[in-house]
Image: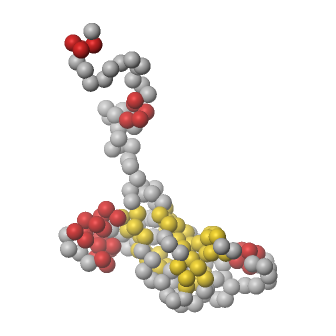
Amino acid sequence: MAPSAFAMMKADPMEEPPAPRETDPAGVVYDKAQYDGAKAAGSSDAEARAAAAIEGATVRLERKIDGEFRDVLSGDPGISPNENPQVTGENGRYQWNVSEGDYRVVVSQGAYETATSRGVHVPPAVTDRHVAMTKTASPAQDSYLGLGMTLAAAALLVPVGLKLGRGARDRR
């Protein structure tokens, strides 16, 4: 049987990580703006996260090895379930049971900026590794005259020497 990716990165290639324990890097991926709105309206932290949960976010688990965070490979015996990445469901949750070590998650979703959690040592259990995401600027928000181009791209179409913002009478 071939050694796991964890074993290949250690000094002793035959050293396997201990079996996963009941300690979780787990949490909810949520939209920061929606969360802030729910909090302003009087919701508790948990209620605001639930209202702002992001479905379909890809959550990658990383383990610190030799001072650097690296992806944990699917099938690694040190995690359960043995899949990485995970995709969040309607409730925005992700969760792994892991062997002892330092972990973080990297979260991506097409409409949002990629977010990276801070690293944590497990154990103790970490069940509140919630990740706030911020939406990226939409090209539709920056469209110029409905032509589907950003304002920066439209600026390239302005002829050199044309003075914008003046009436015809001022161009003499």
Q: Quadrant of the N terminus?
A: bottom right
| Figure colour scheme | secondary structure
Residue 127, horizontal then vertical, whole percent: 45, 83
Q: Report the residue at 61% width, 83% height from top.
A: 101
Q: Is residue 44 above or below residue 171?
A: below
Residue 36 picture quarter: bottom left
- Name the outermost residue toward the top: 172
Horizontal side of residue 57 vs 19, given as left or right: left
Q: Is residue 150 above or below residue 55?
A: above
Q: Report the residue at 32% width, 74% height from top.
A: 50
Does the rendering let one see residue 59? no
Q: Nearer the viewer, residue 80 or 37?
A: 37
Horizontal side of residue 29 vs 21, given as left or right: left
Residue 67, horizontal then vertical, whole percent: 65, 73
Residue 47, horizontal then vertical, whole percent: 28, 76
The number of discs equals 0
Q: Is residue 103 above or below residue 19?
A: above
Q: Report the residue at 64% width, 70% height from top.
A: 68
Q: Is residue 14 above or below residue 139?
A: below
Q: Report the residue at 35% width, 41% height from top.
A: 142
Q: Quadrant of the C terminus?
A: top left
- Name the outermost residue toward the left: 41
Residue 91 picture quarter: bottom left
Residue 78 picture quarter: bottom right
Does the rendering let one see residue 37? yes
Residue 168, horizontal then vertical, whole percent: 24, 14
